[in-house]
Image (tube, helix red, strand yellow):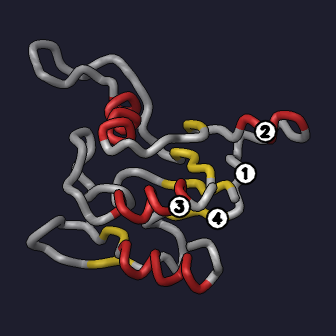
Amino acid sequence: MVIGVDFDGTCVTHEFPKIGQDIGAVPVLKELVAQGHKLILYTMRSNMAPKKQNTDDDGKYLDHAVEWFNQHEIPLYAINQNPSQRRWTKSPKIYAHVYIDDAALGCPLIEDSDVSNRPFVDWEGVKDLLSQRGLL
């Protein structure tokens, strides 16, 4: 299956433009790939010119998210697109069988103010849902 995965609040805590803290996504994402599923990074992050000069903000927000996947040895099928859908649609919406996103209705979330000031994905809950659906 093709699985669309959001980044901020889903793979890491919300700390944009920085990369947030680990919230347990890595082992589940690796297990999905090991089961033969294809991951599409489905994020609002993009690369843009830095807003201020003389800062460490290089504006490569999407590149930093992709590098997070590379550092954790999680291969991506695609980034913000599904290459196979171009054969049958010109829609910009990414086609996937499943979407894991902290903004998705029904996605299990954790609220822990010691970790983040915003809710983030509960990966144990996601793993349970994926197991229930026969994906893990």
Residue 84 is labelled as 2
Image spot of residue 105 (x, y percent): 54, 76
**Disc 1 and disc 2: Cα gap in Å?**
9 Å
Q: Residue at x 59, y 86 (%)?
A: 132
Residue projecting furthest to the top: 53
Mark 3: amino acid = Leu
Secondary structure under badge 2?
helix
**Disc 3 and disc 4: Cα gap in Å?**
12 Å
Neighbours of disc 3 within 10 Å: few (<14), some (14-19), many (20+): many
Residue 95 is labelled as 1
Mark 1: amino acid = Tyr
Secondary structure under badge 3?
helix
**Disc 4 and disc 2: Cα gap in Å?**
16 Å
Of marks 3 and 1, the one in the foreground: 3
Circles 3, 1 touching at the beta carbon (< 8 Å): no
Instruction: Give the residue number, with chain letter if any, for mark 3.
Output: 32
Mark found first going from the N terminus, 3 or 4: 3
Neighbours of disc 4 within 10 Å: few (<14), some (14-19), many (20+): few
